Amino acid sequence: MTRQQVPVARCTVERLMRKAGLKGIVRAKGPRTTRPKAETERPADLVERRFVADAPNELWVADITYVKTFSGWVYAAFVIDVFSRMVVGWQVATSLYTDLALDALEMAIWRRTHGGADLSGLVHHSDRGVQYRAVRYTERLADAEAVASVGSRGDSYDNAMAEAYNSLFKAELIRNKGPWQGIDDVEIAVAEYVDWFNQRRLHGEIGHVPPAEFEELHWQAHGDNLHRILLQETS
């Protein structure tokens, strides 16, 4: 209704939802997927819980979550652009180790650079998990001229935006659409969810528009046709 320029109070929406028998999805907590390494080797925390960006490709956040299936645990890694909340990379696997996170990063880098985006100076922020501090992962960031940032305190607030996305993902897809047989149906569902999340889901934090539209509006305002083409090709 806000998107359609109809002002409405939250309590009014809640009352009408109750009258219609509708209920919002409730988020829940689950087990940790972070496997910390020793305090040595850890990059600095360049974010310090300030998840803000003035344009795409200034700050990405990354995290891993889990899905329980009849065939065992499946893990999903995501990379999110803080400016628009767009999921720029993702991967699903049955292992928690480096390849899962690295494949999600590779997708994000490919999607953004395929049409010519410059990632030099990009800050990539994550928790202290071993997946994100592995040599291959940090080398790939360096190859893209991106800068690694790792939360200093080791709790969810230090990677709050990625944790918030995982919470939505679990509430809106995993618990809402399950049970799940195994990795194959999870992978298909994640692909469909990411497409919906990026292209059609309205986000209150960015003016009740989808991430793809928010980025498009940004590039229109800045007259950057190259990035508009990039967005159309990779969204």
Image (cartoon, rainbow, N blue to C red):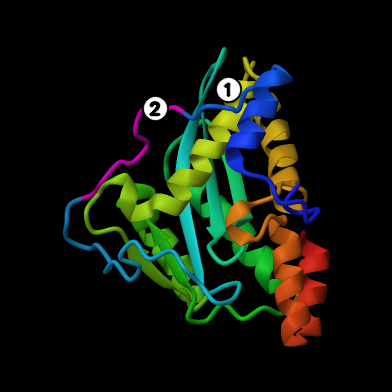
Element type where label 2 sits in the image = loop
Element type where label 1 sits in the image = helix
Between 172 and 207, the one lying in front of the other is: 207
| Disc 2 residue crowd, few under 14, some 14–19, many 20+, Cα 10 Å | few
User: Seen from this angle, which residue lies furthest left?
Assistant: 39
The question of residue 48 being in magenta is answered with: no
Which residue is at a point 57% across and 57% down the rendered structure image?
A: 205
Residue type at mark 1 is Arg
Relative to 175, does residue 14 appear above or below in the rendering? below
Q: Position of residue 36 (x, y in %)?
A: 26, 46
Relative to 183, does residue 149 appear above or below in the rendering? below
| Residue 134 numbered tag | none
Looking at the rendering, the stretch of residues picked out in magenta corresponds to: 28-37
Q: Position of residue 48 (x, y in %)?
A: 30, 65
Residue 105 falls left or right of residue 51: right
Q: Position of residue 235 (x, y in %)?
A: 77, 59
Report the predominant secondary structure element of the magenta stretch. loop
Relative to 221, does residue 129 appear above or below in the rendering? above
Residue 93 in view in this figure: no
Distance (Cα) linking label 2 and label 1: 12 Å
Residue 124 falls left or right of residue 2: left
Figure label count: 2
Q: Position of residue 80 (x, y in %)?
A: 55, 57
**Mark 1 sits on what residue?**
175
Residue 127 falls left or right of residue 15: left
**Mark 2 sits on what residue?**
30
